[in-house]
Image (tube, rainbow, N blue to C red):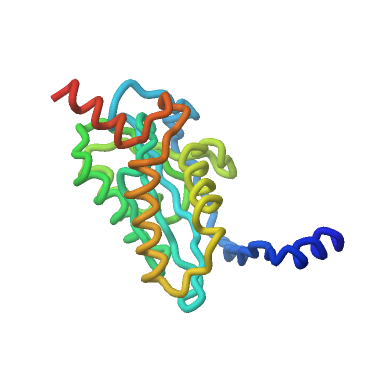
Amino acid sequence: MKRVQRLMKKAGLRSIIVKKFRPTSSKQKVVERENILKRDFSTKTLNEKWVDDITYIYTLKHGWCYLASVMDLHTKKIVGYSFSRKMTTELIIKALENAYHTQKPDEGLIFHSDLGTQYTSGEFANIIKKYGMTHSFSYKGSPYDNACIESFHAILKKEEVNHVQYFDYHSAKLVLFQYIESWYNRKRMHGSISYKTPQELENEIKAVTS
């Protein structure tokens, strides 16, 4: 370890140190909900199955901020997202509304999330019902039930977040917008969709079905 540090110092290199997020423990009992998806991430076309999760972004001035992302499992596109200084139900509602108004899905779409209190709230259940969606939930303590969106957030951290220190909420928000809209959705190719970009695949499907 000391040899590595010595060589890095000689080469003028510094390691990236990311402040770890330590969630506060909740004494509220987690009630299991129906897992409709059951790790079946296969789809036939657009807007059949969406997955959603929240991740944490650290800023020097405002501390922890929160990103909620909605992914269409067919294209791997981030169809909706929301960034906030507070991890509230409003955060995920805005992400879902963003996705819904952009994609305009038919009724019957499966929306999958974990058992976080934001997702199990009555307020969010009303939004799901309003949009004609069916809510599926991961089993308690089973991150693999939502592996695709977990993978996106890991890629986001690896390719962008872990390489910089954001000064404040506003600077982080701008960079996240640029990463998601300009890079991830429109330029980053995915092996799971025949090395196309999410937007490219969506455009191809819409051209055939329109």
Question: Which quadrant would residue 45 be assigned to in this image?
Answer: top left
Q: Position of residue 105 (x, y in %)?
A: 21, 35
Relative to 105, 110 lies left or right:
right
Relative to 22, 169 lies left or right:
left
In the image, residue 183 sits, relative to residue 87, either above or below, namely above
Residue shown at the point (57%, 40%) measured from the top left = 142
In the image, residue 104 sits, relative to residue 42, either above or below, namely below
Residue shown at the point (25%, 26%) measured from the top left = 204
Relative to 200, 118 lies left or right:
right
Which quadrant of the figure contains the C terminus?
Answer: top left
Residue shown at the point (51%, 75%) measured from the top left = 60
Q: Position of residue 128 (x, y in %)?
A: 28, 44
Q: Position of residue 88 (x, y in %)?
A: 39, 63
Which residue occupies the extreme bottom position in the image?
A: 61
Looking at this view, is 65 or 178 the one in front? 178
In the image, residue 34 sits, relative to residue 116, either above or below, namely above
Looking at this view, is 98 or 140 the one in front? 98
Looking at this view, is 69 or 112 the one in front? 69
Which residue occupies the extreme front position in the image?
A: 11
Which quadrant of the figure contains the N terminus?
Answer: bottom right
Q: Position of residue 76 (x, y in %)?
A: 39, 35
Looking at this view, is 149 or 10 the one in front? 10
Question: Which quadrant would residue 20 be assigned to in this image?
Answer: bottom right
Residue shown at the point (42%, 24%) measured from the top left = 194
